[in-house]
Image (spheres, helix red, strand yellow):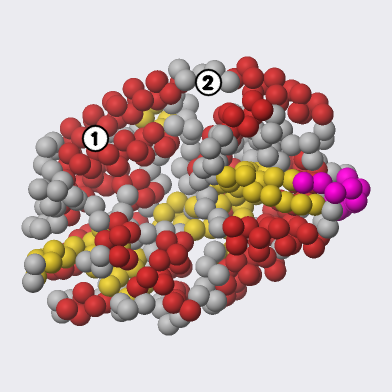
Amino acid sequence: MLKLKGLVCCMMTITIGAGCTGTKEPMNEKTEGDKPVTLTMYQKTAGITDEEFQEYFVKPVQQKFPQVKLEMVRASTQGNTEQELMVSGTFPDLIYSSNPGIANFKTLGLVDDLTDTIKKNGLDLNVYDPKAIDSIKQNGEAGQLYALPFSQNFGALIYNKDLFDKFAVPYPTDGMSWEQLLELSKKLTRNQDGVQYIGLDPYAVNLIGSGLSLPFIDPKTNKAMLNNDGWRKVFDLYKQLFAIPGYVDNEKSKYQYGVNGFFKDKNVAMFTPWFDTVVGQAGAIQDMKWDLAALPNFKEAVGTGREFDVHVIMVSNMSKHKELAAQIMQLVTTSEEVQAKMTKRGRMTVLNKPEMQKLFAQDIEALKGKQIASVFKSKPGLAHVPTVYDSIASQKLNAALKDVALGNKDVNTVIRETEEVTNLAIEAAKGK
């Protein structure tokens, strides 16, 4: 158990006793009067730029709550770990993270169930995409809701049309499987004029497993759940890719090409990143012909994308302004103006309004004329039940690819050993 457990529990007792967790009147901006107040938001695991923070948070909050000044506290800044801020008593009022990150804040005792607060504020959860709410509720043993959804991210297949044209290979289409893309990759992975081209980089192991909603850890036992047919299927896909002549550079021990391979070096024909990566990198490939298709999956799961990935907002129970923080959380997650603006700029809304898909990426010049509608044809799957140790398993899985790529070990051995080292790492983490 974490050494901070006693401290966290003490802080929770003090904080909970100091204030209410909800409001008696829905969205009453006068709850704390007109006295100027500064609230802070902690950002971790879910990316947001300073400009986006101003547009989607600061401006709408100033309009609704003119007495409130909202500031960002980034976890990446030195001295801003959760533990450091908790010990100093300065942990922020709001938390901006992703749904896999909720488990961490829950384990630290920094967030409480929002169910009563939501009822008191008169919020109807039907305004949100049901899958967004269901994915968040996966963090509660009895359906507790520790966060509200703000935006969603999803995977897509992006492909370099120039390379397909160069080698006279037909473009990928919507509804393709990993097995079909593997065959395309064989035609595109070749060395020509001294340049090694790679047909397909499927990205990280954990993201391929996400297409099948594969869990990492048993939430009841905190033991790894990796040595099974699901993860074996994922590693078999990579094994077949690595077996394509020229795919693995044994001299450099290079077997993954990633963001730089597609967007910078431009020697990767197909890549399956998160869509926010496409948005962020689209300007770098203006000199390249490219397009989009639906995210692939294994043949038995085609049409299903990765697990629902949602960026969320939580209220810290260490906040001295929990009522106001809850109202701000509700404001930015339900405002159609905010949600429409960010959707046009490439962040998909979480509101239960399918018509908003038509607004997606409208304001991004580099995406005009692309098959954006294709990315919505792979529907997100329900997230597996997360644990605070998922990140350990994910890291170990991705590291294990090296042995498969370089032919050091067979898949069965790699899977078995990865489960073993993951369990050892979990036990070590429990002692910290």
User: Quadrant of the rendered structure where residue 79 is?
Assistant: top right
- The relative height of residue 347 versus residue 134 in the rendered view (above or below) is below
Which marked residue is nearer to the observer: mark 1 or mark 2?
A: 2
Contact check, label 1 and label 2, Cβ < 8 Å: no
**Residue 157: which quarter of the image?**
bottom left
Name the residue rendered at 36%, 35% in the picture. 393
Looking at the image, is 169 positioned above or below residue 70?
below
Mark 1 to mark 2 CA distance (whole Å)? 28 Å
Residue at screen point 49% across, 33% down: 388
Answer with left or right where residue 148 lies relative to residue 249. right
Residue 157 magenta: no
**Which is the main secondary structure of the residues drawn in magenta?**
loop
Report which residue position mark 2 lands on.
2
- Which amino acid type is marked by label 2? Leu
Q: Which residue is drawn at 9% across and 70% down?
A: 192
Residue at position x 84%, y 53% from top?
A: 67
- What residue range appears in magenta? 25-38
- The disc at residue 415 is 1
User: How far across and down, in percent of the image, does residue 165 sit?
Assistant: 20, 80
